[in-house]
Image: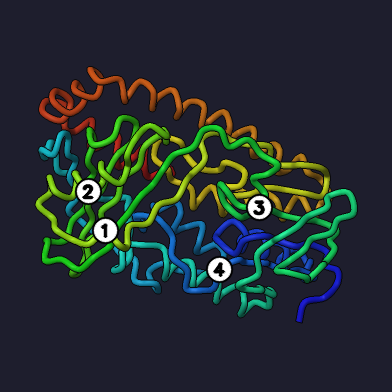
Amino acid sequence: MIKNHYHTIIIGAGPAGLACALTLLAQGIDDLLVAEKHTFPRDKCCAGYITRKTEKKFKSFGLDPADCGYSYIEDFRLYFKLKCRQRIENKFLFTSREINRVALDEAFFRLAKSRGVQIAEDLPVTGHDPETNKLTLGKTQIVTYDYLVFADGTLGFGSAYQSTARRNLAMQLIFPSDRPDGIEIHFGVTKRGYSWVSTYQGLTNVGMTDEFRQTEDYKKIFADFLKDLGLETDLTGLYAAFTPIGVRKPVLRENIYFVGDAMGACDPFTLSGINYGLMSGEKAALAIAAEDPRILEDYARKLSTKFTVMRLIMKVFYVPWIHWLVFNVGCRFLSGLVTFFFNRFLNKK
C-alpha cells in the first residue's frame, strides 16, 4: 500500500533507480518508494552486452550476471560495408542467451524487492509540483517526498526539466535463427553509429544505432540492412528507443536529482550506459544520505569531461576517410593495435 509521504521517491526501476534504492538502504534510509510505469519482466532496446566492469559493479550490489545466464560469446568480428575486416578474441563483452537485458533487469528488480525496497509497478508519474514536493502517480494517487530521484530514461517524465535536443537512436529485432553463435559489429550502415548482429543458441539480435536525424527513414535503413545480410523476418517486433547525448543537469534543486539516462549518463560513442547508471544511482543515494548534492554534481562533471572527449573521438572516427582508413588499413596491417583498443578501451565502459 502506498503511503502519503516518503523520505525518497525514485521514478524508474531500471539499474540506476534500483542502485539508488539499494544504496539508500545501505545508508540506513528505508522510507522509500520506487515508481515504475511498466511491469516486470519489461523489454529494453539493448544488445544485451555488459562489460567486465559492469559485471563487477552488479556484483557489488549482490547480483552475479552469471546467474542470469550471462557468458562470453568468443567469436567477435568487425565489419565495414558488410565485409568482415577483423576477428577479435572477445575478452570484454558478456551477454545472455536472449541477447537482451530482460533477465538481468528482472533479477535486479527481484533482488531489490527481496531486500525490502517498495516498488510499485504499472504506476506512471502523471503530475509533479516541485514547489510543494507533490507527485501524482497514476490517475489520482498524490504523494509527497523529501527527496525525488528521476531515473526514468531519456524521454521520461523528468525530461521536461532537461534539454533533449540531441540524442542517439537505437533499434533492434530479436528472432529465432540457425546462424552460428557470434558477435558482428558493423560500421558503414548508418552515418554516425554502428550496427550489430549477435547470435547465441538459436536466437539472433539485429540492431543499429545512429545520431538521430528526423530526415532519415530508419525503418527502411534497418530493413535494407536485414536484406543485405540475407535475413528474411517479420519487422513487427522491431523496437526503438533513444539514448542521450551529453550529460544533463544532475540536480534540479537540492532535493530533486537525476540519474542514469535521465542525467545523460550514457557514452555518446558506444552507447554504453549500464555501469554509468549504476554509478550515478549510487552517487545520488550518497548525496541524499549526506544531504550534499555536490556528491552527484562532482560525478556528473567528471562524466561530462569524459563524454566530451568521447564525443570528439566519435566525430573524428566517423569522418569518412578516417573510417575507411581504420578498416582498410588499420585492420589489415595493425590488427594487434585494433584488438588492444577494443579489449582494453571498451572494457573500461
Crowding at mark 3 (Cα within 10 Å: few <14, some 14-19, many 20+): some
| Cα distance between the residues tagged 4 and 3 | 14 Å
Q: Is mark 1 on a helix, strand or loop?
A: loop
The answer to whether any part of residue 151 appears in the image is yes
The residue that mark 1 highlights is: 235
Quadrant where the N terminus is found in the figure: bottom right
Which residue is at 45% across, 68% downward?
A: 64
Type of the residue with mark 4: His
Please report the residue visible at 18 percent of the width from the left and 69 percent of the height from the top: 202
Q: Quadrant of residue 28?
A: bottom right
Q: Distance between the residues labelled 4 and 2?
A: 28 Å
User: Badge 1: how crowded within 10 Å, few (<14), some, or many (20+)?
Assistant: some
Quarter occupied by residue 313: top left
For the residues marked 3 and 1, what is the alpha-carbon distance in whole angstroms? 29 Å
Q: Where is residue 32 in the image (x, y as percent from the top left)?
A: 75, 68
Closer to the chain start, of discs 4 and 3, is 4
User: Mark 2 highlights which residue?
Assistant: 223
Label located before the other in sequence (3 or 1): 3
Name the N-terminal-most of marks 4 and 2: 4
Answer yes or no: do the residues labelled 2 and 1 have beta carbons within 8 Å? yes
Q: How crowded is mark 4: few (under 14 residues within 10 Å), some or many (20 or more)?
A: some
On the image, numbered disc 3 is attached to which residue? Answer: 157
Given the image, on which type of amino acid does mark 3 rest?
Answer: Phe
Q: Is residue 33 left or right of residue 19?
A: right
Q: Residue 214: image x %, image y %?
A: 42, 34
